[in-house]
Image (tube, helix red, strand yellow):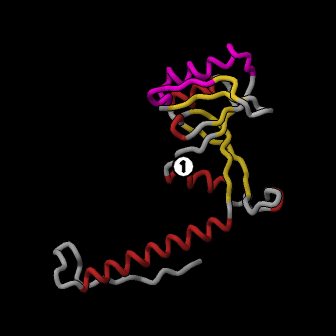
Amino acid sequence: MNLAIFVDAQSGRPVWYSLYNRSISDKRRFENTLDTMPKLCITTSPLVFDRGLVAADNMKYLSDKQCLFATPMPLDLVEARRLVDAVKNSIQCAANRLDEQKGFPTSCDSVVYGSKMKAHVYYDPENRVADEETLFARVTRLRDDLEKMARTKRATKNVPTCLIFNKMMRE
């Protein structure tokens, strides 16, 4: 079950909603939902939706209608690296710092499913450190598990009898 809802930007109160038995990510249902806005006298409004609605047809529709929207984008690793590379030299500067926050947001032009749009990239140095610690802890656990498996007398043919690990150096 999915819920489509329009709320008043000032009060946050619902002005319209519809329940759907299936996903509204398909082109026809998404367009019909958004085409309801003018019928409700909603002329301009930024849209907020989850990544489940991110699909090529929906992005094209939003681009063609010049709709403002915010959604987390389901990026593959190549696209995520491209976005980070585009802003990495300018993101962590005083001009980008959020008030009373530790993060640094910035924007860059992007193409998603063939539609030009503005991507907003957010960098939090504390999250980076936490992510690195999590990664290193996971690698250490895996290394220890593999070494333990290699010492087991009932090791299968797929487990090498000797495992060599290079020490990971942190930059």
Identify the residue at image location x=67%, y=32%. 47
Q: Mark 1 points at which residue?
A: 79
Q: Position of residue 85 (x, y in %)?
A: 62, 56
Q: Position of residue 43 (x, y in %)?
A: 75, 20
User: Disc 1 residue type?
Assistant: Glu
Identify the residue at image location x=67%, y=59%. 123
Q: Give the range drawn in magenta.
A: 17-43
Q: Is 117 on the left-hand or right-hand side of 90?
A: left
User: 140 above or below 22?
Assistant: below
Identify the residue at image location x=56%, y=38%. 112
- As drawn, the residue found furthest toward the front would be 13
Question: Where on the picture, by quarter, is residue 70?
Answer: top right
- As drawn, the residue found furthest toward the top would be 39
Foreground pick, 142 / 56: 142
Question: Where on the picture, by quarter, is residue 138?
Answer: bottom left
Residue 37: say if magenta: yes
Foreground pick, 43 / 118: 43
Q: Where is residue 130 in the image (x, y as percent from the top left)?
A: 59, 69
Q: How crowded is mark 1: few (under 14 residues within 10 Å), some or many (20 or more)?
A: some
Total tally of numbered discs in the picture: 1
Task: Tell me the quarter of the image containing the C terminus.
Answer: bottom right
Q: Provide the secondary structure element on which disc 1 rests.
A: helix
Identify the residue at image location x=16%, y=80%. 154
User: 106 above or below 47?
Assistant: below
User: 34 above or below 46?
Assistant: above
Q: Position of residue 18 (x, y in %)?
A: 57, 24
Q: Is 96 on the left-hand or right-hand side of 131?
A: right
Q: Is 158 on the left-hand or right-hand side of 78?
A: left
Residue 95: say if magenta: no
